[in-house]
Image: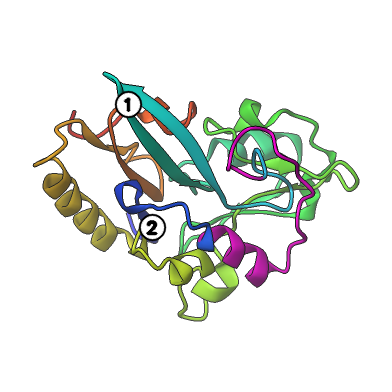
């Protein structure tokens, strides 16, 4: 399997949200009006103009508090269910770039009236209420096709995110997994065979996000 892949090491994330900001800046996306809803996570969820979101989750394990931070985005699935389902409604409304593996939405999605979770196991896509068009991370396909890395990756000061050829990223991810497991035996990589965004974390995947699958590697 060829193409590109992200490796996101959540054990290093400090929730600076540089990735969230850089995504907005590169894609020239507007800010989302929010309010204090009891969490530093803002906006509360992905939106039609928020493709990257750092999720905050406070976990209490055996009386010990740990903050889990997750830079959420589209997984660019190897076999994207959203493409299969949406193209059943409107042919060619979702494209799968053969060279990178990026899953790309078009304006043809505007007539597809579904819930995000009905077509995506990670509940990622969002629909614009005005235009009807569905949107999500597009892997910064314009940058990648010109030999650049996605904006979120280049902005990450803590080295949480890496991006490159799939085999290289898998090797780096498993090397890091072995290192993390020396201290945390419950470290995992979520769905490594199914997605192009490899999340490495510790503990229960659901402690990061309810849609982060528990079908993990090497457990």
Above or below, comparing residue 202 to residue 10 in the picture? above
Q: Are marks 1 and 2 in contact (CB under 8 Å)?
A: no
10 Å crowding of disc 2: few (<14), some (14-19), many (20+): many
Q: Residue at x 41, y 26 (%)?
A: 206
10 Å crowding of disc 1: few (<14), some (14-19), many (20+): some
Q: Which mark is residue 204?
A: 1
Q: Which color scheme is applied?
A: rainbow
Above or below, comparing residue 113 to residue 24 in the picture? above
Q: Quadrant of the C terminus?
A: top left
Is residue 214 or residue 109 the one in the foreground? 214
Q: Which residue is mark 2?
A: 5
Q: Which mark is residue 168?
A: none
Q: Quadrant of the N terminus?
A: bottom left
Q: Residue at x 46, y 63 (%)?
A: 100
For this orientation, the residue located farthest to the left is: 182
Place of residue 142 in the rendered image (x, y in percent of width and height, measured from the top left): 59, 73
For this orientation, the residue located farthest to the right is: 130
Point out the tag, 1 or 2, that comes first from the N-terminus: 2
In the image: residue 146, left or right of residue 114: left
- Span highlighted in magenta in the image: 19-42
Magenta stretch encompasses residue 35: yes
């Amino acid at each position: 399997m060829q193409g590109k892949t992200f490796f996101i090491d959540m054990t290093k994330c400090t929730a600076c949200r540089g990735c969230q900001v850089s995504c907005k800046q590169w894609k020239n996306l507007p800010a989302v009006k929010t309010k204090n809803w009891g969490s530093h996570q803002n906006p509360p969820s992905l939106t039609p103009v928020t493709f990257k979101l750092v999720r905050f989750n406070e976990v209490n394990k055996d009386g010990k508090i740990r903050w889990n931070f997750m830079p959420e985005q589209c997984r660019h699935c190897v076999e994207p269910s959203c493409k299969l389902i949406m193209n059943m409604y409107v042919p060619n409304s979702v494209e799968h770039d053969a060279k990178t593996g990026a899953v790309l939405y078009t304006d043809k999605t505007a007539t597809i009236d579904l819930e995000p979770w009905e077509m995506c196991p990670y509940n990622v896509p969002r629909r614009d209420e005005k235009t009807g068009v569905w949107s999500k991370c597009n892997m910064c396909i314009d940058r990648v096709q010109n030999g650049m890395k996605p904006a979120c990756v280049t902005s990450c000061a803590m080295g949480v995110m890496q991006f490159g050829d799939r085999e290289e990223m898998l090797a780096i991810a498993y090397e890091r997994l072995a290192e993390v497991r020396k201290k945390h035996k419950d470290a995992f990589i979520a769905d490594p065979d199914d997605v192009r965004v490899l999340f490495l974390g510790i503990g229960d995947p659901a402690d990061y996000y309810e849609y982060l699958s528990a079908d993990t590697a090497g457990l």
